[in-house]
Image (cartoon, rainbow, N blue to C red):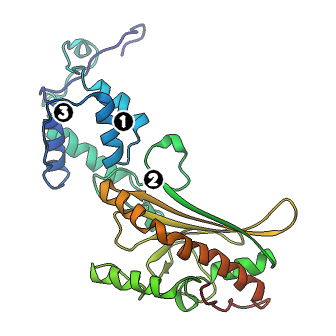
Amino acid sequence: MPYGISRACDIGGPEVLTYRDMMLRYSAVAGLPRRRIVCVPVLTPRLSSLWIGLVTPVPPSIARPLTESLRHEVVCRERDIERYVPLPASGPIGFDEAVRLALQRVRDAQVTTRWSSASPPGAPSDPLPTDPDWAGGSLYTDRREIVVDASREALWRVVEGIGGENGWYSFPLAWAARGWLDRLVGGVGLRRGRRDAQRLRVGDSLDFWRVEEIEPGRLLRPRAEMRLPGLAWLELYAEQDENGRTRYRQRALFHPHGLLGHAYWWGVSPFHAVVFGGMARNIARAAARAPRTGPAEPQPSS
């Protein structure tokens, strides 16, 4: 814009489309399955926002203002911008080509420094368990915390030695069954084990998990690679509280994809006390019984 010009200008393409048309054409350009769109006679913005919050990762607090804005037309009715910014020689870009260029730019701009940074072409960035609440999306959490009668170093050796031959310190049959089920549906199952029996690094496979983050002596965060209707992480912390006691802190996190993801979390939640509760207790016991050097001995479930 030339110096001294201070105003808002509409910028539009050569087509006027409905939101329905845009969604269908986006899915076609992005290579997604064709979407089935059902028209309903009456649906208020509030009801629509609640439905969006149920079947998508967008919470109602964000979905409602977005839904309410749909009642307003967003059509470019003036072309004054062309006085200051000339059109390209080929003319305005159509919707399909604009989407294709945008998706290509997303692919070209990605610099994958680790496996967890990658996402499929055309997909939005995956959420992280460290995202703030206002970033949007549902994130179910199972929290466990326990004081450990061992040094922080001993606790960390147990945490870093988890998986593989040492197992997951809780209900071995349940973990084995989950691995078999994952293989039945084309997943990796538990067959990968781990690269090193004592040490982990970012990017290591860990049974049907992969190490996404590790802070030696404090935090291990693997991300699930089993087949799930969502994204899942485990966070295992070895910490020291203000009284100098060693404290083990554990979080299981799940970001659901659609209704199936929500149903999956609530369907397995009755078993969390056994699986995750037992895991926290047995890791604490293993740390208390572990030798001062070397990997911790696996412990039976309680």
Q: Which quadrant, please, contains the N terminus?
A: top left
Residue 145 is situated, as x and y percent measured from the top left of the image, at: 68, 66
As drawn, the label of residue 19 is 3
**In this picture, is 299 found above or below 127?**
below
**In this picture, is 51 found above or below 149?**
above
- The Cα–Cα distance between marks 3 and 1, rounded to whole angstroms, is 15 Å
For residue 214, say whether it is visible.
no
- Disc 3 is placed on an element classified as helix
Observer-nearest residue: 82 or 261? 261
Q: Which quadrant, please, contains the C terminus?
A: bottom right
Foreground: disc 2 or disc 1 = 1
Give the labeled residue for mark 2.
Answer: 127
Q: Residue furthest top?
A: 4
Give the labeled residue for mark 1.
Answer: 63
Left or right relative to 249: residue 245: right
- The Cα–Cα distance between marks 2 and 1, rounded to whole angstroms, is 17 Å
Label whose residue precedes the other's in the sequence (2 or 3): 3
Residue 200 is situated, as x and y percent measured from the top left of the image, at: 59, 79
As drawn, the label of residue 261 is none
Quadrant of res 97: top left
Q: Residue at x 14, y 31 (%)?
A: 41
- Disc 1 is placed on an element classified as helix
Q: Residue furthest right?
A: 243
Quadrant of res 98: top left
Total residue callouts: 3
Q: Residue at x 65, y 81 (%)?
A: 282
Q: Residues within 10 Å of mark 1 (few under 14, many from 20)?
A: many
Q: Amino acid at mark 3?
A: Tyr
Residue 286 is situated, as x and y percent measured from the top left of the image, at: 70, 85
- The Cα–Cα distance between marks 2 and 3, rounded to whole angstroms, is 25 Å
Q: Residues within 10 Å of mark 3 (few under 14, many from 20)?
A: few
